[in-house]
């Protein structure tokens, strides 16, 4: 697991989106979204920006380094 | 929910098919070496046809996936994905494992007398080492993919 925490699950719930919906919306596979969500895969800058843009927030709202990093 | 996989799903499928195809290709290399080394049996012939059949199926599926990807529009600006990263990791692991085997070739094979690989002509020794690399690549890829097996998405039912 990485030191990168994210709130994708929270934003998805707020927007009533499944992982597959989000994956289609930003042009990645569902596996990519699910592994980013659980912290197993650190996304590229482009994917992180696309996720943040899709939810209309900044990247820092979606992704944060764990405490002390 | 539509049934058409997007470009990213097709790329994942292509990566998985390449890792899958590595196994029958590795089997063919080993079986070829065994046949040329004088091992002659019906089992080898059957396994050879099974490996060729499996490889043909993979090649057909791969061709279909590549064609569908080509028709799916212009490439995205960024095609990074978990499966692409996993395939790159598996390639690195297989390269390192093969390097270690090659540097320890004498003690691993000749010294221990395993299969007498060191006695094989260079072309077959190369085939077996390549087969080893392909098997490590494939197994590493699937091990990493399974480790990240999809958790059920709770919101999937709601959508």
Image (tube, coloured by chain):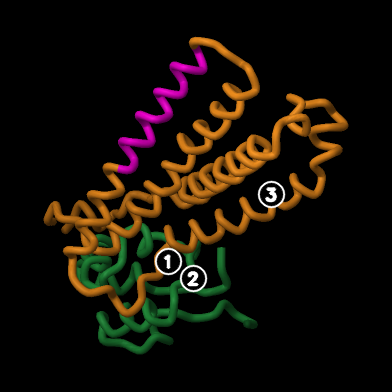
Q: Which residue is drawn at 61% across and 58% down?
A: B92
Q: Please give the label number shown on residue B5.
A: none
From the viewer's perspective, is residue B119 above or below residue B96? above
The x, y position of residue A19, in whole percent, is: 28, 62
Q: Earlier in the sequence, mark 2 or mark 1?
A: 1
Q: Please give the label number shown on residue A36.
A: 1
Q: Name the tint of chain B in the rendering.
A: orange
The part of the chain drawn in magenta is B43-59
* Predominant secondary structure, magenta span: helix
**Circles 2 and 1 in contact, beta carbons < 8 Å:** yes
Q: Please give the label number shown on residue A42.
A: 2
Q: Which residue is drawn at 46% across and 50% down?
A: B145
The x, y position of residue B38, in whole percent, is: 63, 17
Q: Please give the label number shown on residue B97.
A: 3
Image quarter where the N terminus of chain B lies is bottom left
From the viewer's perspective, is residue A35 above or below residue B135? below
The x, y position of residue B8, in whole percent, is: 29, 63
Chain identity of mark 2:
A
């Amino acid at each position: 697991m990485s030191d990168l925490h994210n709130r994708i699950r929270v934003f998805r719930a707020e927007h009533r989106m499944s992982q597959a919906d989000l994956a289609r919306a930003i042009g990645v596979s569902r596996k990519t979204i699910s592994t980013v969500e659980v912290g197993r895969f650190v996304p590229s800058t482009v994917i992180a920006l696309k996720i943040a843009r899709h939810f209309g927030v900044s990247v820092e709202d979606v992704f944060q380094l764990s405490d002390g990093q | 929910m539509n049934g058409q996989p997007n470009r990213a799903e097709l790329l994942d499928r292509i990566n998985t098919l390449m890792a899958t195809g590595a196994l029958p290709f590795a089997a063919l290399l080993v079986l070829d070496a065994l046949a040329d080394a004088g091992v002659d049996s019906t089992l080898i012939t059957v396994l050879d046809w099974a490996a060729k059949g499996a490889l043909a199926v993979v090649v057909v599926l791969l061709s279909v996936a590549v064609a569908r990807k080509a028709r799916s529009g212009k490439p995205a600006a960024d095609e990074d994905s978990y499966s692409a990263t996993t395939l790159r990791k598996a390639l690195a692991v297989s390269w390192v494992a093969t390097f270690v085997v090659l540097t320890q070739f004498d003690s691993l094979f000749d010294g221990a007398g395993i299969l007498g690989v060191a006695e094989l002509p260079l072309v077959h020794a190369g085939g077996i080492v390549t087969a080893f690399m392909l098997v490590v690549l494939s197994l590493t890829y699937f091990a990493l993919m399974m480790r990240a097996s999809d958790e059920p998405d709770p919101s999937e039912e709601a959508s």
